[in-house]
Structures are given as C-alpha cells and as structure tokens.
Amino acid sequence: MCTPSGELGGIPRGRIRYDNLRAAVERVLGLSRARVENDRWTAFRSHWGIDAFYCRPGIEGAHEKGGVEGQIGYYRRNHFVPVPEVASLTELNAMVDQWDLDDEGRRLRSKTRTIGEYFALEQPLLRPLPREVFETGRWFTPRVNRFGQVTVRCNGLITGDGRQLDDASWMLLGDAREAGYRPCARCGSPE
C-alpha cells in the first residue's frame, strides 16, 4: 500500500511537475502537454488529489526539466555511485531515509537557506493526507503447476518453504517499501 507523501506529512497544493514517466504516460499527444495516462496512474493521482503538470516534449520543454533532472543526477551520483551493497530492500530504504535526513542540511547553490529550512516554511501549506491507503499491488489469478510454482508476469515463483500452492488470486506487490506476493484475503487462499 502506498503513502508517498507520508514522509512529507501532507500533499503539495497546486501542480506537481512530471517528465513523462513511462509508468504513468501511455502516449504523448503531439508537442502539447496533453497525455494519455495509464489507468493505474489516473487512479493513483485521483486518490491523492494530485494535479499533474507534464513537461513539454522536445526542445520546447528542455528548460522545464532542468531543475528536476539536475537534482535526480545529484542524488544518483552522490548516493548510488557506486551502487550500494545491501542485504535487503529494508536496509536500502533505511539508507535512503538517512540520506534524505542528511540532505536537509544541504544548501542549493546561491540559496540563503538549507533544504530543511525551506521545507519547514512550506510544510504547513501541505494539504492533509487522505484517510484511506492506496493499494499499489495488482491482482493476478495464476495457475499452479505440479511443482507448486506459479508464473506471474513471466516470473516463475514458488513459496519459500516449498509447500504446494492452490490456484487462487494473488496480489503482486512492488512498491518502494515492500516487495513480494500475498494471497487474496477475499478468496481465503492460504497464507
């Protein structure tokens, strides 16, 4: 389940700028800001009340992407080069959380305040979070073979303890905090 603005304590007002991310945009319509969005992305945006603002494609939108791309590059170069070696997704998430805390003391170029000081000024302006969570997983009903394996999105899976699985609906999880599979609570398949 997804709470992307949980760390912020709220949802930004106004528009959030996106650079035509493939997970959200199925097709760019010409050289305008109009997009054909993925159904899951539309549901996600609607749940959180996000007003997406897409950068213009090509040279016309190059100036819109610079600040976002520059900060992504900075973060990648300073935290993911070389690639950190971790034993689990939980360990990597803890490292990212610490890097974010450390960045609060960083000053951007000629700015007079740190990132944390600017955020302290803006945090009271955030909209409240919705009470319901947004489920990011996708339901699948895979067939189980005689070895207790299922195939979901071209990946062969077997339970960790090797027990036989029943044909049932399963939810594919894959957000930043949790990765794996869990059985459908509605159909009563085994845990």
Image (cartoon, grey):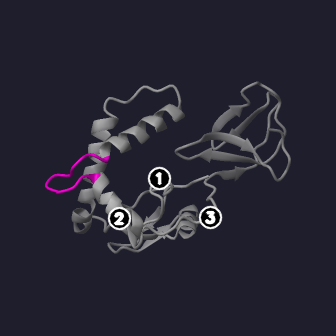
Placement of the C terminus among the 4 image quadrants? top right
Q: State whether residue 175 is above or below residue 78.
A: below
Q: State whether residue 147 is above or below residue 57.
A: above
Dots 1 and 2: beta carbons under 8 Å?
A: no
Determine which residue is flagged by label 3: 131
- Amino acid found under the numbered disc labelled 2: Glu
Q: CA distance from mark 1 to mark 2?
A: 14 Å
How far from the left and from the top, in percent, is residue 148?
Answer: 79, 30
Determine which residue is flagged by label 1: 7
Q: Quadrant of residue 79?
A: top left
Q: CA distance from mark 3 to mark 1?
A: 15 Å
The tag on residue 122 is 2
- Mark 1 / mark 2, whichever is N-terminal: 1
How far from the left and from the top, in percent, is residue 176?
Answer: 52, 45
- Mark 3 / mark 1, whichever is N-terminal: 1
The tag on residue 15 is none
How far from the left and from the top, in percent, is residue 86?
Answer: 46, 27
Mark 1, Cα crowd under 10 Å, few <14 / some 14-19 / many 20+, is few
Q: Quadrant of residue 179?
A: top right
Q: Main secondary structure of the magenta part?
A: loop
In this orientation, which residue lies closer to the viewer: 56 or 184? 184
Q: Which contiguous range is marked in magenta?
A: 104-115
- Amino acid found under the numbered disc labelled 3: Arg
- Residue 108, magenta (yes or no): yes
- Amino acid found under the numbered disc labelled 1: Glu
Dots 2 and 3: beta carbons under 8 Å?
A: no
Q: CA distance from mark 2 to mark 3?
A: 22 Å
Mark 2, Cα crowd under 10 Å, few <14 / some 14-19 / many 20+, is few
